[in-house]
Image (spheres, helix red, strand yellow):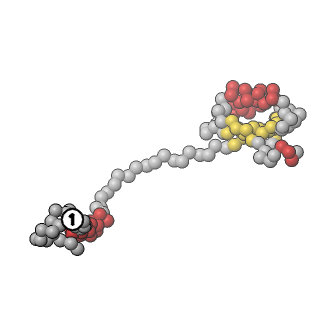
Amino acid sequence: MAFGSFDQQGGNQPMSEINVTPLVDVMLVLVIIFIITAPLLTHGIKIDLPKASSTANPEKPETVTLSLDAKGKVFWNDQPVPDEQLAAKMAEAAAKQPQPELHLRADHNTRYQKLAEIMSAARNAGLTKLGFVTDPSPAAER
């Protein structure tokens, strides 16, 4: 290490080394402080917390599968349903709590008009959860 000297030969040049002694002193003080305070951070204070009751988990709604074949026949959970009784079944399902999910499955040859009528009847009955079920296989395999 080069310290300043009393000879005049190079006395005007700045020091080329950094004095790290103050940095080491500060770091050692910080390490000692952390060693002393670390055990205090893990020590807990025993307190009596208030008790609270939470609401019960909501029940998972049942699923109603409404299927349409290529001829336009309607099936409610795989049971054939005449068109006249479909609106009554939908109103009955809409009155349940929690309201069931209506899964609509239709043959790829089903007319859109029939699907639109069923979706309209479901909305008029008060069913709000309507989903379409499709076949994930590619159309080329048919």
Q: Amino acid at mark 1?
A: Met
Q: Residue at x 46, y 48 (%)?
A: 54
Q: Position of residue 4 (x, y in %)?
A: 15, 69
| Residue in front for this viewpoint, 34 or 113 | 34
Q: Nearer the viewer, residue 35 or 81?
A: 35
Up-down relation of residue 118 to residue 19 (above or below): above
Among all residues in the image, which is located at the extreme bottom?
1
Q: Residue at x 80, y 37 (%)?
A: 106
In the image, residue 86 sits, relative to residue 58, either above or below, namely above
User: Which quarter of the picture shows residue 132?
Assistant: top right
Q: Which residue is mark 1?
A: 15
Residue 7, by quadrant, is: bottom left
Q: What element does badge 1 sit on?
A: loop
Q: What is the x, y in percent for residue 32?
A: 23, 69
In the picture shown, does residue 62 fall above or below 95?
A: below
Asked if residue 8 lies left or right of residue 48, the reply is: left
Answer few, some or many: residues within 10 Å of disc 1's Cα (few below 14, many 20 plus, some between 14 and 19): few
Residue 95 position in % (x across, y down): 64, 33
